[in-house]
Image (cartoon, coloured by chain):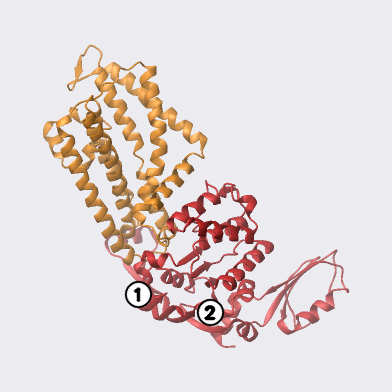
Chain colours: A red, B orange
Amino acid sequence: MKMIRTENITKKYKRYKKQEGVIGSIKGLFHREYEEKIAVDAFNMDVDEGEFIGLIGPNGAGKTTLVKMLTGIIAPTGGEIQVMGFYPNKLEKAFKRQYAVVMGQKSQLFFELTAEDTLRLFKEIYRIPEDEYRKNKNFFVELFQVQEIMDVQVRTLSLGERMKMELIVALLHNPKILFLDEPTIGLDAVASKQIRTFLKNINESRGTTILLTSHYMEDIKALCKRSIVVNYGRKIYDGDTDMLFEQYQKSKKMTIYFEHSVEPDVPEYCRILEKTNDKLVLEIPKQNTEKVLESYIGHYPIRDIGIEEEEIGSVVERIYKGV
Amino acid sequence: MKKYLEIARAYMKAQLIWRADVFVDVILSVAKILFAWILWSILFEGKEQIAGLEFHTMISYYIISSYLFQMEKSAEISQQMTGMLRNGTFSKYMVIPVQTQGYFVAMEAGKLAFSSGIGFLATVLWFCLFRISIVHTVNLKILLCGIIMVILGLLFMALLNYFLGILTLKFEEISTFLMIKDNLSAVVTGAVIPLALLPEWMIAGMRFLPFYYVTYLPSMLFIGKCEDEAVTGLFVLSIWCIFFIVLNQVTYEHYRMKYDGAGI
């Protein structure tokens, strides 16, 4: 079953262009110039039930605009769009009961109250029967191990704890589709991993279709079988995530901290990004990562070592250039 | 309906968190009554009546109307809406299965339930402390009309402020509208001066406007004045409420579909 279907959807914004200075401001009182910005351009997308899709792209690529159109917050300027058979921007209640959205700064939690209070409110908003509410709440609370903080004022929770609560609130009514905008932003490695495990579990055990936008390659790689890459409002890649990284991710970033000041040898195929007495940051061709790692471990007094995926912007740029 | 009650309950609970706010609220209500007592005592010196009202009737009017005026905090709705639309957090209300108008009215009702309780206790306390012989109606029907009118009046103000909030979708900047509304309602509700002090033709004109019935008329009804206007008042206010419920629904749907500002 198709959960999402878009055909040539486009979104154009009109922006006021003001000339600089006081004179420009005064002129603007009488005559205004507007420019048109195409945020999403002839975008086609089909999503099947139960898919876990990554929406990737640099800032300003059009990802959030796309999610806003899919959730009905804004209307497309042109094209056709259907989510679970509904035209999203009508914002029918029957439609809104079937999806959930977790978007960065737009918290649904009551910061003055406890998470338990917010859950009780959402039980009524989504008309969840008492039995189902208890069952779902217990399931998520146990999955996330948050029993201890259910009665604590939300304001006092850490960012990671808050995101867990945000997800529980979003999933309480068993949505068919979950839209996630940067769910791991600002979280430490442990909390990010917990969130990823949780999302994977929800997708597999409940069959929830999930559309995830993230800047973190780790999120996309760990969770999404399929990825859609967006740039300048257009789709530039739609396919298997492994293939995407295999084909376009060329390098990794290795950060090494030494116990004391050393002068390490750097292989010629590596690019030095940063070098201090006790720290070395290298860009390494993907296929040589293991070799470089072996050449340092055991040969130098290493305090810590970290390997990161290549940042999303470089991958997108490569897809865009077709190299 | 149950969900809106739960929304109201959530906001009422949130009000109870900040203890300092609760105490300041009580102190402010008390200070206002004290100020009125001093002011009207001076004005009544050597006089039996002002604008047809005796001292105790006037002070009763002032305390009741200032209590009603203090209860009315719906300006928060428009301020909150405009802020959220512009900083991009308003959409969180759009994606949940509630009517945004209902959500904001319920939110206001929840906050009000708390502040009206506090205000009521403070008012009763001051009536006792100053040994003010409160002048009030003995007609239960009029009392009931007054209570319904207060509820409708507060509903109307919430709807009006919601309407002004919606205008952000069109104008983005609504502070001028808010300023006009604040000044107009402060004068027309009788909170600045009793409307009895105004010329008759002006009061006659105000009878077609809803503001007359928000603070002024219910206060007068509670002190046993203007009883013949009670039913007409309820009718006029109900019409205004229905008008704004429909207007808000239509305006919101119209503008939200057109709006695509960066901050939604």
Nearest the viewer among B146 and B53 is B146
Chain ID at mark 2: A
Nearest the viewer among B161 and B128 is B128
Which label belongs to residue A77?
Answer: 1
Residue extending farthest to the left is B201
**Residue A299 placed where, x, y %?**
88, 74
**Residue A293 placed where, x, y %?**
80, 77
Does A148 sit left or right of B204 as displayed?
A: right
Chain ID at mark 1: A
Residue extending farthest to the bottom is A323
Residue B31: name its quadrant.
Answer: top left
Residue B168: name its quadrant.
Answer: bottom left
The reply to whether label 1 and label 2 mark residues of one chain is yes
Q: Quadrant of the C terminus of chain B?
A: bottom left
Q: Residue at x 28, y 23 (%)?
A: B60
Q: Residue at x 38, y 21 (%)?
A: B126
Residue B56: name its quadrant.
Answer: top left
Amino acid type of the residue that numbered disc 2 sits on in the rendered structure: Val
Does A104 sit left or right of B195 as displayed?
A: right
Q: Residue at x 84, y 75 (%)?
A: A296
- Nearest to N terminus: mark 1 or mark 2: 1
Residue corresponding to mark 2: A229
Q: Is residue A110 visible?
A: no
Residue extending farthest to the right is A299
User: Is B250 above or below relative to A242?
Assistant: above
User: Is A107 above or below relative to B29?
Assistant: below
Q: Is residue A246 visible?
A: yes
Residue neighbourhood size for the residue with mark 1, other residues' Cα within 10 Å, grouped as few (<14), some (14–19), many (≥20):
some
Q: CA distance from mark 1 to mark 2?
A: 21 Å
Amino acid type of the residue that numbered disc 1 sits on in the rendered structure: Thr
Q: SS of the residue at dot 2?
A: strand
User: Is B175 above or below relative to A83?
Assistant: above
